[in-house]
Image: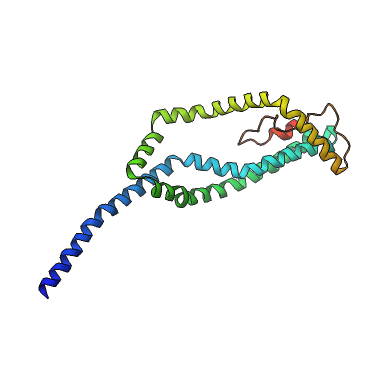
Amino acid sequence: MTQRFAVWFATGCALVVLAAPVAAQSSTKKELVQKILQNQQAEIETVARNIVERPAQQMMQEAGLAIQRQVAPEKRDAVGHAVEAEVKKYVDESYPLVRERALRVAPATIGATLEEKMSEDELKQLLAWLQSPVNKKYQELGPDMRNAFIQKLLLDARPVVDPKVIALDGRIRVILGLPPAPAAVSVPGPTSTPPPARQPAPPARAASR
């Protein structure tokens, strides 16, 4: 009986010793993932803001068309400012709510994937890269590079896209029973410069011209 107990005790101690490194490794991975998520918090918040602003930007574009077509010229500026105020109120109220949820959901989605799919060594390398001066400089250059790319693409695509947008507008007007658009009116579309992420006002102002 004493010998059997000794065997069980020895086996239990061995299992504890074997499990200890696994638990330590899991704890280390969780800490690394948490640091990575903290490093990427600005990106997570940007995603939350984009989710909030995407429908607002679409509504601003539609409002711009409506103002251009249905509002008297002398009233367009005032109507445009009123629309801008409502959109700003929506963003100011909605963004904090979505941001809070984004930061809460990130560990269970992004964090869980990183912890499951990447080894401890890979997580260390990833964190080192995210914290490196090279990555920080790349992130600083990102907006300028994206803006330059977008402006160049819009310029190059305009001759191809503009006729199609105008033709589409004409067909939709026929379906809706609306009169043709005035020749001097430019139809907003892919050729328009996208509004800044945090300032969805420009499209409505453009409509007041």
Closest to the observer, 125 or 102: 125
- Image quarter hosting the C terminus: top right
Residue 120 falls in image quadrant: top left
Residue 127 falls in image quadrant: top left
Horizontal and vertical percent position of residue 142: 52, 29
Horizontal and vertical percent position of residue 76: 80, 34
Residue 51 falls in image quadrant: top right
From what the image shows, is residue 201 above or below residue 155? Answer: below
Applied colour scheme: rainbow
Count of marks, rendered view = 0
- Image quarter hosting the N terminus: bottom left
Horizontal and vertical percent position of residue 96: 56, 47
From what the image shows, is residue 41 above or below residue 188? Answer: below
Does residue 192 appear to the left or right of 17 in the view shown? Answer: right
| Residue found 22% across the figure and 60% down from its top | 16
Closest to the observer, 205 or 110: 110
Does residue 99 appear to the left or right of 132 in the view shown? Answer: right
| Residue found 71% across the figure and 42% down from its top | 59
| Residue found 69% across the figure and 41% down from its top | 58
Does residue 62 appear to the left or right of 148 in the view shown? Answer: right
Horizontal and vertical percent position of residue 61: 72, 38
Residue closest to the far left: 2
